[in-house]
């Protein structure tokens, strides 16, 4: 029997970031475009991940409302603030929607809401733009929930672009909503990684590939680019290139320049600069 579920992706516009940490020759920083996925049945829907600013999330809420579906659940793939800071805005529009995540991802959310992260990192970069009400998810017990009788499965992915990440698998439609386990033509945030965790990340990509998905939605993607399973290998190759070049270079600038020579057209090169600086010190 054919599944009744369908999916759509809303990609946030890039928003300016207040920071002085810029790569050579770059005069401004913008946040990478973020993906939010709506999985819909005949009546109900599930939203996977939200955005950062109140303006971005208001646009997301309008988009969800325009679907005409009843939003039952908001699922966060991981604990980075740029994927859950919009929950209050969405729940204001859909007050009965529950907000869920894995227990491990919730531990990262709590860290992101601590003063060193919320005040010193997020609010300093997006002054006056972050919702003052930032709810934390309830634990998704058992790792599985349903939408109109079909299973949505939370799969642990370990340490990818941060610790305790997941992806959401919808077997009936061959869909993996990968969160930040996969990137789609956007420079990859490797600033929280080391050589060991990058191997863990590659194992998570292997796991996604083993599911044989028909579509894979990245947490950060170039607007308009297809959600093709090939982004799994693209992400894996980028990480391998970063590992290889990190091992043979001495400075952040060398690492940045050599990676940029391979990936000159990916969105948001300042992310690569931050990754190189984090790895090289």
Image (cartoon, rainbow, N blue to C red):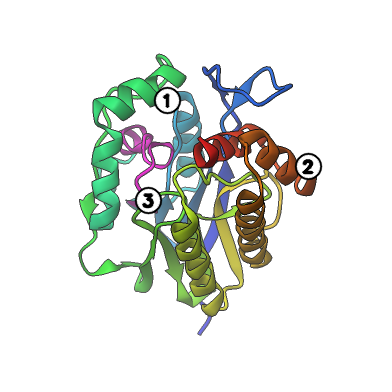
Dot 1 corresponds to which residue?
Answer: 54
Percent of width and height locating residue 3: 50, 75
Badge 3 or badge 2: first in the primary sequence: 3
How many numbered markers are drawn?
3
Describe the element under mark 1 as helix, strand or loop.
helix
Describe the element under mark 2 as helix, strand or loop.
loop
- Whether residue 86 is in magenta: the answer is yes
Q: Kindly report which numbered mark, 3 or 2, lies closer to the viewer in this rendering.
A: 2
Foreground of the two, 210 or 137:
210
Disc number placed over residue 78 in the picture, else none: 3
Image quadrant in which you'd find residue 170: bottom left
Task: Kindly give the residue lying farthest to the bottom in the view shown.
Answer: 1
Query: Residue at the spot x=57%, y=50% of the render?
Result: 9
Badge 1 or badge 3: first in the primary sequence: 1
Foreground of the two, 147 or 55:
55
Q: CA distance from mark 3 to mark 2?
A: 28 Å
Query: Residue at the spot x=65%, y=57% of the render?
Result: 244
Looking at the picture, does residue 132 appear above or below residue 143? above
Asked if disc 1 and disc 3 are in contact, CB closer than 8 Å, the reply is no
- In the image, taking residue 94 as reference, residue 61 lies left or right, namely right
Percent of width and height locating residue 75: 35, 53
- Whether residue 54 is in magenta: the answer is no
Percent of width and height locating residue 195: 49, 57
Percent of width and height locating residue 261: 79, 44
Disc number placed over residue 154 in the picture, else none: none
Dot 2 corresponds to which residue?
Answer: 264
Res 122 seen here: yes
Query: Residues in magenta?
Result: 74-93
Q: Kindly report which numbered mark, 1 or 2, lies closer to the viewer in this rendering.
A: 2
What is the crowding at mark 1: few (fewer than 14 residues within 10 Å), some, or many (at least 20)? some
């Amino acid at each position: 029997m054919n599944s009744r579920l369908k999916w759509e992706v809303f990609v946030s516009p890039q928003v300016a970031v207040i920071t002085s940490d810029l790569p050579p020759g770059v005069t401004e920083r913008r946040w990478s475009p973020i993906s939010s996925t709506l999985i819909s049945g005949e009546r109900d829907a599930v939203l996977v991940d939200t955005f950062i600013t109140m303006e971005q999330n208001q646009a997301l809420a309008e988009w969800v409302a325009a679907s005409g579906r009843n939003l039952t659940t908001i699922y966060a793939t991981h604990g980075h603030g740029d994927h859950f800071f919009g929950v209050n805005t969405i729940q204001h529009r859909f007050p009965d929607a529950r907000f869920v995540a894995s227990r491990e991802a919730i531990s990262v959310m709590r860290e992101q809401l601590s003063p060193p992260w919320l005040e010193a990192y997020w609010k300093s970069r997006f002054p006056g733009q972050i919702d003052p009400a930032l709810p934390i998810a309830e634990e998704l017990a058992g790792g599985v929930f349903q939408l109109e009788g079909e299973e949505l499965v939370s799969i642990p992915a370990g340490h990818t672009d941060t610790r305790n990440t997941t992806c959401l698998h919808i077997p009936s439609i061959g869909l993996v909503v990968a969160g930040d386990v996969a990137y789609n033509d956007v420079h990859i945030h490797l600033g929280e990684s080391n050589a060991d965790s990058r191997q863990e990340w590659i194992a998570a990509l292997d796991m996604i590939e083993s599911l044989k998905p028909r579509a894979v939605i990245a947490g950060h993607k170039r607007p308009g680019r297809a959600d093709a399973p090939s982004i799994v290998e693209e992400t894996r190759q980028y990480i391998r290139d970063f590992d290889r070049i990190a091992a043979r270079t001495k400075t952040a600038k060398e690492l940045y320049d050599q990676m940029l020579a391979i990936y000159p057209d990916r969105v948001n090169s300042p992310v690569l600069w931050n990754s190189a600086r984090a790895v090289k010190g």
